[in-house]
Image: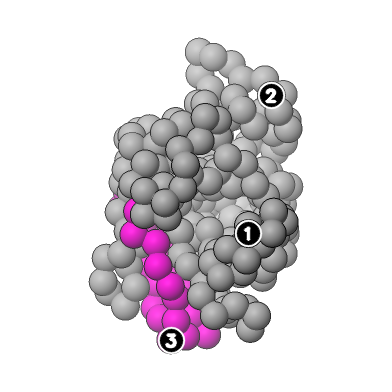
């Protein structure tokens, strides 16, 4: 899928940027090192599915993990960031799952190879619809949650990010350049775990954005 929805508007997706290791508790649970700069990776556009669609796990993995995250929709081109209002380039906010074939990722990391097969399969970027940016009262201090079959599995608070939104946007704009239609996954808190066929997934951002998926 190469498009998402901002309110009722259809938006063509450009790039999908993802920030890894952005919450201390998540770094600890995976026994990773704390980064000295944002860890950036990308997903192909074909990895997108939207709320209400069935999420199909890749046949080549026996351990697909969920990672619930605040997701940004970029609304204008930026090769540098206005320091007085860095969030002004964001047109919408959503909530999503950065899915990881953890067994494949571990194998690739051991060999020093790229993670694309572990992070970029179809359905690996599961997204809600986006709401206009001004509807999220405080993006720097908001809560998002993830439930499986009604049980709370993750609760994140954006004020706990190692690299806040302004820092992420500055890094991405200056290093890669941001363009209208880019999507940015901002990192996941602790509580990641496996998905199983038949699971019913519920995501919520600050009570204003919701998404649901069935694992098929």
Q: Residue at x 53, y 22 (%)?
A: 86
- Marks 3/1: CA distance? 31 Å
Q: Residue at x 55, y 34 (%)?
A: 38
Disc 1 crowd, CA 10 A, few/some/many (<14, 14-19, 20+): few
Image coordinates for residue 210, horizontal then vertical, percent: 39, 60
Image coordinates for residue 127, horizontal then vertical, percent: 53, 60
Res 110 label:
1
Q: Name above or below for residue 45 compared with residue 49.
A: above
Res 198 label:
3
Nearer to us: label 1 or label 2:
1
**Is residue 149 found left or right of 133 in the rendered image?**
left
Nearer to us: label 3 or label 1:
1
Q: Quadrant of residue 191?
A: bottom left
Marks 1 & 2, CB-CB < 8 Å contact: no
Image coordinates for residue 80, horizontal then vertical, percent: 67, 20
- Marks 3/2: CA distance? 42 Å
Residue 192 shows in this picture: yes
Q: Name above or below for residue 135 compared with residue 209.
A: above
**SS state under label 3:** loop
Asked if the stretch drawn in magenta spans residue 74, the answer is: no
**In which quadrant will I find the N terminus?**
bottom right
**SS state under label 1:** helix
Res 90 label:
none
The span picked out in magenta is 189-216
Q: Quadrant of residue 101?
A: bottom right
In the depicted view, which residue is nearer to us: 72 or 154? 154
**Is residue 168 found left or right of 120 in the rendered image?**
left
Marks 3 & 1, CB-CB < 8 Å contact: no
Q: Read off the residue under disc 2.
A: 174
């Amino acid at each position: 899928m190469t498009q998402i929805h901002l309110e009722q508007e259809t938006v063509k997706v450009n790039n999908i940027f993802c920030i890894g290791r952005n919450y201390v508790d998540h770094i600890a649970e995976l026994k990773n090192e704390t980064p000295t700069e944002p860890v950036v990776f990308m997903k192909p556009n074909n990895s997108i599915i939207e709320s209400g669609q069935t999420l199909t796990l890749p046949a080549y993995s026996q351990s697909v993990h969920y990672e619930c995250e605040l997701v940004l929709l970029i609304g204008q081109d930026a090769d540098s960031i206005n320091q007085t209002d860095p969030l002004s380039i964001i047109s919408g906010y959503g909530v999503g799952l950065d899915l990881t074939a953890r067994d494949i990722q571990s194998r690739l990391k051991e060999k020093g190879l790229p993670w694309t097969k572990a992070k970029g399969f179809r359905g690996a970027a599961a997204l809600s619809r986006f709401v206009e940016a001004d509807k999220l009262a405080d993006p720097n201090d908001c809560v998002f949650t993830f439930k499986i079959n009604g049980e709370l599995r993750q609760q994140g608070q954006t004020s706990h990010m190692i690299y806040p939104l302004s820092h992420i946007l500055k890094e991405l704009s200056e290093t890669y350049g941001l363009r209208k239609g880019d999507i940015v996954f901002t990192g996941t808190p602790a509580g990641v775990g496996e998905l199983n066929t038949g699971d019913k997934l519920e995501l919520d951002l600050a009570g204003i954005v919701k998404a649901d998926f069935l694992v098929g």
